[in-house]
Image: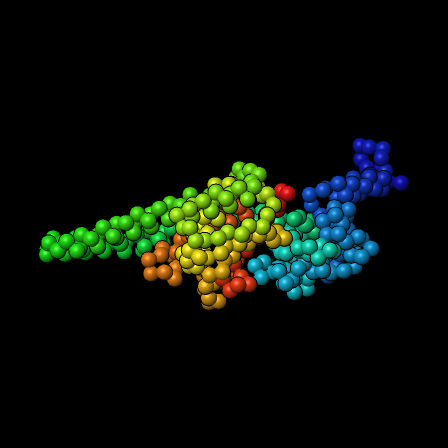
Amino acid sequence: MAESPGTSEPLTERSDSRATVAHRLVENVSTHAVFQLDSDGDIVTWSAPAEDLYGHNAESILGQHVSVLFADKESTDTDSLPEEFFEKPETETIEVEHWHRRADDAIFWGTLTLSPLWNGSFHGYAAVSQDTTTTKEYERMLERQNDRLKEFTDILAHDLRNPLNVIDGHLSLYEETGDADHLETIDETTDRMARLVEDLLRVARQGDVVTDPEPTDIGDVIETAWEGLAGDSGPTLHYETVGSVSSDPDRLCELFENLFRNAVEHGGNGVTVRVGPLDTGFYVEDDGPGIADDHKSTVFDHGFTTHDDGHGYGLSVVRTIVNAHGWDIIASDAETGGARFEITGIEFLS
């Protein structure tokens, strides 16, 4: 049996030893699923971490094409492997981000790295897969925050300039005519600007991501928020217990205040507001006039309003607070025909 120079260990035994070490490394990398594909993209080895990540055992997955791990229906925003990828050998390592599907049909965002295996000839690919859902969610959160920042630049560039132009114009007319009606218009415009700035500052304050959430009793927050409507004796609140959540209670209170105020502004003092639980969140609905179907997709946009004297930032604030917590919100119809807002994506504490 041949021996390597400088050692009495046979070459075959050293090769077997290295293969054993490599196998143990693959099996003990808990954060990454390592497996091998042949030149056609079929799975030819399957490690324990790969089974843990995808839920498939070796017997069920070996021989299947790697595409079985992908969730094609969720792949609209991904650089998926092209169908012709395995038609010819690759020479460079590639990284693919894609929605992946586990054996139980659960979906996760994964990063798959394929490294060509060459040793005189082509032997397929070493595949390394990792669940990067948390990273993807963080990127989307940053995108949402950047969208909010763009909204502010739009507001500052347009919405504040308009009332300033009104003030400038009426001030010139007052200087020319001495008509006090122009001063009244200026006074009304400055009041409107003050409300606008207050709304903008509120949105800005709510724009930060919640980094230090605390256990929060939603019932207590709702009670505080409803007290803000004390001057409106007509509205009625019906509350069905919602579990405790991890949140910034001040921002959560601001969320409910805006939704309650929106219900009263559109439904009047006689409106009834209901708050209740959902499987992964809660809803706030009223029996007012509701939201037109063609407005449901834009009702959270900054500046959107159906009132002549409205600024359209109340629901924008709501969406910003929801996104800051990593939750989701949609507008729909209540059974009574009124507006219904569903906040989901929440993990209840109790």
Q: Quadrant of the N terminus?
A: top right
The reply to whether residue 322 is in sight is yes
Asked whether, in this view, residue 280 is left or right of residue 3, the answer is: left
Name of the residue lying farthest toward the right = 1
The reply to whether residue 149 is in sight is no
- Of residues 230 and 92, which is closer to you in this image? 230
Toward which corner of the image does residue 77 lie, by quadrant?
bottom right
- Of residues 158 and 87, which is closer to you in this image? 158
* Percent x, y of residue 227: 45, 44
Asked whether, in this view, residue 227 is left or right of residue 240, the answer is: left
Task: Please name the residue shown 36% across and 55% down the image.
Answer: 311
Name of the residue lying farthest toward the left = 177
* Percent x, y of residue 332: 52, 61
Q: Quadrant of the C terminus?
A: top right
Task: Please name the residue shown 30% across and 47% down the image.
Answer: 194
Task: Please name the residue shown 61% across and 45% down the image.
Answer: 243
* Percent x, y of residue 78: 58, 58
Q: In this view, does 16 lie above or below 293?
A: above
* Percent x, y of residue 199: 37, 48
Q: Is residue 162 above or below residue 208?
A: below
- Of residues 281 and 153, which is closer to you in this image? 281
- Of residues 132 and 189, which is closer to you in this image? 189
Toward which corner of the image does residue 73 lie, by quadrant?
bottom right
